[in-house]
Structures are given as structure tokens and as C-alpha cells.
Image (tube, rainbow, N blue to C red):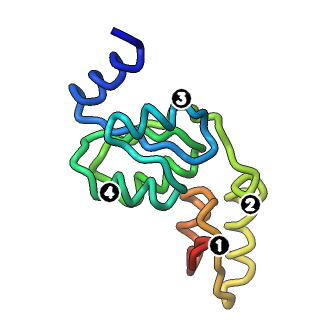
Amino acid sequence: MSIQDQIKAELKARNAVLVAHYYVSGDLQTLAEESGGLVSDSLEMARFGQNCDADTIIVAGVKFMGETAKILSPEKTILVLDEGATCSLDEDCPAQEFSDFCDEHPDRKVVVYANTSAQVKARADWVVTSGS
């Protein structure tokens, strides 16, 4: 049995699904598709996880993608393949600096892009995506 077949069997046995972002390796994308998961952008990955019957969502992407999946599926276990994987858009908006800005400007409505941490999203008035 190939390693791919072993992984597919484990996913099924554990009622887990693999979702992969477009920029991860082709092998991971193929594994996601062949095992009943999804290859997509970060928001669609989170929505797929929310609407599927799996108890566990395995995210092949960056940390904020796992956080977004957890926001939409708080009752599910979310695992991120590489918790050290980051996004420059997220890194350029440090949560503490953003929180300080919000505290200093309570009269402003703040809009953030979806490619930010859960901490940043929690302080924002609006969260938008490229499709918004």
C-alpha cells in the first residue's frame, strides 16, 4: 500500500478531511482531492470544512487559514500541517499593534482583509475578502 493510500485510509478511519490551498505542493493537492477534500482559497477551504461531515479538518496552508476554519467550525478539531507557515499580509498586521490602534481610535470603523489572524479579525468592525 502506498503512503498516499495509507493517508487516505487514516483520513477515512478518523473521519477527517484534508483541505489544501492553491499554493501548496501538487502532491498535497492531489491527496486532498482524491480523499474527498478540497483545493481552494482560504475562505472556501473554511466553508468546505464547515459544511462537510468530518469531525477533523486538516489544513494544508498557513496559520490564519486554520484559525478561519476554527471560527466557522468551532465544534470541529482543526489541525494545521505547519503551524509555522505564515502569510506576509498577516505578518504585516501584528495583533497587538492593531489592537493598540483600535484603542487609540475608538471612533473609527476598521476594515481588515481576511488574510489576518483571528485576533485581528476579532477587533475589526468588518472583515473582507478579495471577492467582497
Reply above or below: 123 against 116. below
User: Disc 2 or 4, which lies upstream in sequence?
Assistant: 4
Q: Is 90 left or right of 129, judged from the image as shown? A: right
The number of callouts visible is 4
Reply above or below: 16 against 118. above
Task: Look at the numbered disc 1 and give the secondary structure of its residue.
Answer: strand
Task: Look at the numbered disc 2 and give the secondary structure of its residue.
Answer: loop
- The residue singled out by tag 3 in the image is 27
Where residue 11 sits: x, y (%)? 30, 29
Q: Label 2 to label 4, Cα distance in Å?
A: 26 Å
Task: Look at the numbered disc 4 and give the secondary structure of its residue.
Answer: helix
User: Disc 2 or 3, which lies upstream in sequence?
Assistant: 3
Q: Label 3 to label 1, Cα distance in Å?
A: 32 Å
User: Disc 3 or 1, which lies upstream in sequence?
Assistant: 3
Q: Amino acid at mark 2?
A: Cys
Q: Quadrant of residue 96?
A: bottom right
Q: Nearer the viewer, mark 4 or mark 3?
A: 3
- The residue singled out by tag 1 in the image is 112
Q: Amino acid at mark 1?
A: Val
- The residue singled out by tag 4 in the image is 50
**Residue at horizontal 33%, vertical 34%?**
35
Q: Which mark is residue 93?
A: 2
